Amino acid sequence: MTPEEYQRIKEAEKEHLRKLRALKQKVRELERLKRVNQALSDVSGGAADTLETHREMIEKLALETAWSEARLELAL
């Protein structure tokens, strides 16, 4: 193998490794973005569930209050 061939192969391998490093970096960035999006989705979903539960409890309290007021009026 001539020195020129060796240098050409060496440079080709370096370029290959640079591209591989860049691809790995891109994968890490995409995985991080995926985790962030999943966390945001979990938070949003949790907040929606909490608000729905709160609404249901308010409706239940309003119904119980109406029943109690009706019984009180009948008792008087």
Image: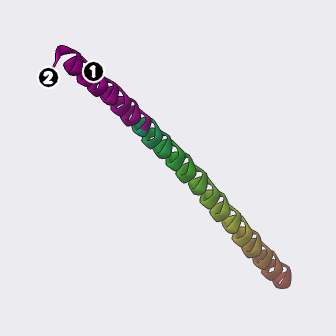
Residue denoted by label 2: 1
Q: Nearer the viewer, mark 2 or mark 1?
A: 2
In primary-sequence order, the first of circles 2 and 1 is: 2
Residue denoted by label 1: 8
**In the image, is 32 to the left or to the right of 5?**
right
Residue under the image location 43 percent in, 43 percent down: 31
Residue lying furthest front in this view? 2
Q: Give x and y (percent) for residue 69.
A: 81, 75
Task: Quarter of the image for the N terminus: give it.
Answer: top left
Q: Amino acid at mark 1?
A: Arg
State the extent of the magenta-drawn residues as a range: 1-26
Q: Give x and y (percent) for residue 22.
A: 40, 30
Q: Nearer the viewer, residue 9 or 56?
A: 9
Task: Quarter of the image for the C terminus: give it.
Answer: bottom right
Q: Give x and y (percent) for residue 14.
A: 29, 23
Residue under the image location 50 percent in, 40 percent down: 33
Whether residue 24 is in magenta: the answer is yes
Secondary structure mostly seen in magenta is helix
